Amino acid sequence: MLGICALPPALSRRGPLTSHGSGYTFATMYFASDNTSGLPAPILDAITRANDGYVPGYGTDPFMDALRDRIRTIFEAPEAEVMLVTTGTAANALALATLCPPWGAIYCHGLAHIEVDECGAPEFYTGGAKLVHVGGADGKIDAGALGDMLARSGRGVVHSVQPAALSLTNLSECGTRYAAQEIADRAWIALDHGLRVHLDGARFANALVAEGCTPAELSWRAGVDVLVLGGTKCGLMGVEAVIFFDPAPYWEAQLRRKRAGHLWSKHRFLSAQMLAWLEDDLWLGLARHANAMAARLEAGLEGRLMFPRGGNMLFARLPRATHDALQAAGAQYFLWPDHQDDLAEVSVRLVTSWSTQPQDVDRFLDLV
Amino acid sequence: MLGICALPPALSRRGPLTSHGSGYTFATMYFASDNTSGLPAPILDAITRANDGYVPGYGTDPFMDALRDRIRTIFEAPEAEVMLVTTGTAANALALATLCPPWGAIYCHGLAHIEVDECGAPEFYTGGAKLVHVGGADGKIDAGALGDMLARSGRGVVHSVQPAALSLTNLSECGTRYAAQEIADRAWIALDHGLRVHLDGARFANALVAEGCTPAELSWRAGVDVLVLGGTKCGLMGVEAVIFFDPAPYWEAQLRRKRAGHLWSKHRFLSAQMLAWLEDDLWLGLARHANAMAARLEAGLEGRLMFPRGGNMLFARLPRATHDALQAAGAQYFLWPDHQDDLAEVSVRLVTSWSTQPQDVDRFLDLV
Amino acid sequence: MLGICALPPALSRRGPLTSHGSGYTFATMYFASDNTSGLPAPILDAITRANDGYVPGYGTDPFMDALRDRIRTIFEAPEAEVMLVTTGTAANALALATLCPPWGAIYCHGLAHIEVDECGAPEFYTGGAKLVHVGGADGKIDAGALGDMLARSGRGVVHSVQPAALSLTNLSECGTRYAAQEIADRAWIALDHGLRVHLDGARFANALVAEGCTPAELSWRAGVDVLVLGGTKCGLMGVEAVIFFDPAPYWEAQLRRKRAGHLWSKHRFLSAQMLAWLEDDLWLGLARHANAMAARLEAGLEGRLMFPRGGNMLFARLPRATHDALQAAGAQYFLWPDHQDDLAEVSVRLVTSWSTQPQDVDRFLDLV
Amino acid sequence: MLGICALPPALSRRGPLTSHGSGYTFATMYFASDNTSGLPAPILDAITRANDGYVPGYGTDPFMDALRDRIRTIFEAPEAEVMLVTTGTAANALALATLCPPWGAIYCHGLAHIEVDECGAPEFYTGGAKLVHVGGADGKIDAGALGDMLARSGRGVVHSVQPAALSLTNLSECGTRYAAQEIADRAWIALDHGLRVHLDGARFANALVAEGCTPAELSWRAGVDVLVLGGTKCGLMGVEAVIFFDPAPYWEAQLRRKRAGHLWSKHRFLSAQMLAWLEDDLWLGLARHANAMAARLEAGLEGRLMFPRGGNMLFARLPRATHDALQAAGAQYFLWPDHQDDLAEVSVRLVTSWSTQPQDVDRFLDLV
């Protein structure tokens, strides 16, 4: 199964995805991904401020101390440990490696980013663990299916990989959302079978503001052991926080990070960014804006949505003629791989971000 | 998915599988696995003969030279290289590691031994490759499904693991058999997509005599690059030959074997066994006997078989009362995990071997 | 053997290394490491400029295209391929993984960063290769010792790891420098024995301007297959270019990068920085300044140097009283681990950078 | 550094090592290695007896139960767990993988089998740990050197691999022996620094009978956590017991064994051999004989020995003319790699075994 960001270049160059505009930048109607946006001004400012003078490296900078405090406060988790890396793939794989031994199994949805978009990073970091697919509609793991699989998991049988971790994604790869209770339902099943729980939160901020609960409710209170709090898709340059609500594996995680080449010497530039992002609830504001832009899109695409919208991402079926017109007008988005050969309709993925402008949404909808 | 040999001990101790006899040995009606049999007399003799005097180690023994020649002759493959290890898991994993890089994907059936019964050995040996399940009835990969999956495989996309190998099993885990043409059909699809082909032949001898073709026809002529020729289930103590029809990866394979601790210093005891097995077609005779015993079983289980019998293994649905009577009489076999909780019927796996006696089959059938 | 950046915190907190000033930033006499400096203005500007608009991710940005061209021109290597990551550890380990199989040996100096300061990253990325120490004075590999070791290396012997790569570091960890001819001498020995050559160029810019030759002369013309061109210690936020003069392993390298979580979605921020650094020879100017500051230090430390200065780093023996006075005045530097318990003298490492000010050097020397 | 069994074939074929007889077997004066001997009659008998009937596989056989009991008794360790594999390389690497994480360091002598003769098996099994050389005369680790290195080991420093295990070898690769107190001296230093202790006992039996102490005194009472009790070099076909005096890692070890393809289906043939070997102190008698033959050799080589003889292996300097005469007479032994180019003298390794005959020793000495 291909993930969205793994769409083969041959396909993406097959006309539809090419901008007709003047180049890469300044495209309007840019819904390809939230990681194609830049940084909001406060983050750029934070980088500039952090640039002054000499600062010790490798995570011993004062910005990191402040960030750790801030995250502990926001998540009501005074014992939590925090580690920064620069990509979601690294964050997920490092987190999973602390939860799952080489002979372990990670239960995840078949569409999960860790399965389809990371070129085997979890296998690399864990030393060869196995990702086991759990079914479920709309990109969300079905609790019943999870329970059934764990009941037949081979725990204690030397011939079988040993169940070790459950990995959830919120927002999911289909743009849908787990409510706090839904996270908890799956986490308790996992915990009952001795698994620990990882949450890929590349779009945690978008899920959070949409759900309207607290960060703790959507993470450790719902049974999550390790959260990847994604900053990159939500306005940072390349900053992801791995939050260990159980601090036990933190030292191991630091060694794994260093060993993987993910410990920055000029670490202050990572921590200062995320600190600014979490100050004054900037992160929530950015996520709310992205979600609002997606809601605006959704309103204009009534009846065409493939999955319930959970935040800032939606999938829609469009007539091919509409698609052609959008492309001609310079709209940017990815096609859902499974349906790309349909003659009458195409399935498109539309992602909004902190920088999406209402007029771009409206122009897109006018063309639809 | 649990494999047969991974049946949880808790279940297997739940009554049905316990012998009522005096212990482990001398059980009659022993259909648990072909690897619970011992060695036929000519193999024991070969061990004794090989014991004389001093012999250089690590595969430089004269028995190995003769064995290599014998295999090249039998397979009509004068360029082939041969490497011995002592378990099928090691043989498969070493073979796959030479075909698939750490970032590669191995396409296999979801019931394949490499997926369900090797505790992640392929992932360990390859350095973290991914096993991708291809569907198909009766434990055999469906050619159409394989083609469809490879067409969407993500080759050339940096976010995706790269398709590298196809792994087939003959006999399959369901006891069914690929004809030479069926192997070829799947291999050509794989080769068209740049994959190389591995054949897990733990029961290759049983498949071969049932199919009635030549060893070459069922292996390299059908597109197989590396064959694991299994001896352990067919009368040897613990000897599997990895046959590289393309000798290019042989040196790498030798280093991988040593590095994995599978290069025997007293290697003569492995090569002498397999040499005796292949002399005078002993291996074919042993396999014919095992298959004949399975055919005798099959004849008495008409209408109850779950899959077409390919060789020396069959699966049948039995009324629970029959099952209870068999257990009470000391019959030994495994239950098929997926149906173990059915109240009225159980699914059983029955495996015959070179040492199975007709009277044991008949006694079993009398009870049925 | 501990590397400098691995100095135990317990030791570094033992008085001497603590600043007496107001905190981390704005320390004068900051000679701890060149990676504790920030970014020069043109690099900050490049980040700001790259921030505009939407840009495709994962290395497909136009800045990367321009950077690749620029590097090919500077290095007179039109076929070279270039890959960016954010740390030297990642760059080195990824480079080595393309040169050395899991069963291979990497020949390096016992003080090399890859051996003492990367927490086993080369072992992780290669899948378990072995680093073999080659002796030599002043942190530089002795050509004769290298030849002798390779003559007894175990090539072709299945019990031995197989010699695969030579890794050199320029500037070395002792701050010394290989001339182009010295690189070549060692590279030819390696090539004669079938090894490929990696150059850890974390301070390549400093070596280059000190040596006064062309980039090509100090890399591929001297036999280097893969160069890690370090930006981080020379003015960038966290950008290292892995330059493959032989482009053959480039695709594999890209997959390894992704799989390791080092492929940035907002990649433009890496390529734009390095592009600005290489434009108008900014990189050479920054390195010349750092070297000049080190020369100024050297002039004042006559008779105390432990190794010949190669660029922007030097090691000196100081009376303990001098050391105490420097510490009291707020000077920042690391102690050389091996001599930390000497009563009368301490060994100090002093590193200058693009941001070192002459007055800081002079103040330091006044105290000496 | 090359190990003995890694002597390049090119060298070993350079005349001296070639038998002048009619082939491999029945060579007299065969001192190449103790692993070139076959099996004594009681072991062959045990194999034949174990062959009867059907026996459950994968270590659940009754021979294994008896063997476990026997080892617990012999070692006075009622809690110990035991696991069988077929090679010393596998046994060592599996043991070390349970003691050392991927980011760990294993302290060993530079001549250790795990360093020079296993093609990187410890690195493979641990997932990339680092072997750190500790010096010491006669192939034995110097306690002072060990203490000094551990005092500067980088524990707690994220840039350094973390000290995890000490690996000792008894008999050492130089044929010397650690007394129980010498083991303990080194083990306590290791334990003081938080390391765990592995003992490579490929020739433990030879060391034991030479030392004249109890098995417990030479293992867990001296601080050993995991012992590899070697059977292969002492009369078995290919059987090594990994004995976990601390049973905590036993389950993990079993999974690692299976995953590495070292769990035998026909496991009875391994356990029955070792059971017979330990019954009636056969193992001690075989080792005593081998040692006695080495003592006989030693007596005739007075003044020529390179290291004090610890058991059944010795190294001697011989005039080249003597060496040539021995070779001409068909004597079999390896040359010590470091001195092979000396013109006047050669260094030879002589190993005796359970099957060495006094007349072969005497004939050898006559030629000397």
Image (cartoon, coloured by chain):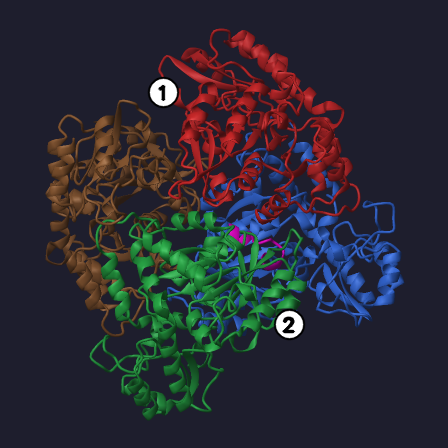
Chain colours: A green, B blue, C brown, D red
Quarter of the view holding residue B181: bottom right
Q: Quadrant of the C terminus of chain A?
A: bottom left
Specify the subunit that label 2 lies on. Answer: A
- Percent x, y of residue C129: 41, 42
Quarter residue C330 falls in: top left
| Amino acid type, mark 1 | Asp
Q: Secondary structure at mark 1?
A: loop
| Dominant secondary structure (helix, strand or loop) of the stretch shown in magenta | helix
Query: In this picture, which residue range is highlighted in magenta?
Result: B114-124
Q: Which of the two residues, C194 or B177, is positioned nearer the viewer here? A: C194
Identify whether C91 is placed above or below C136.
below
Say few, some or many: other residues with alpha carbon within 10 Å of mark 1 (under 14 / 14 to 19 / 20 or more).
few
Residue B298: mark in rendering? none
Q: Which residue is mark 1?
A: D341
Label 2 belongs to which residue? A144
The structure residue drawn at horizontal position 76% and vertical position 69%, both measured from the top left corner, is: B305
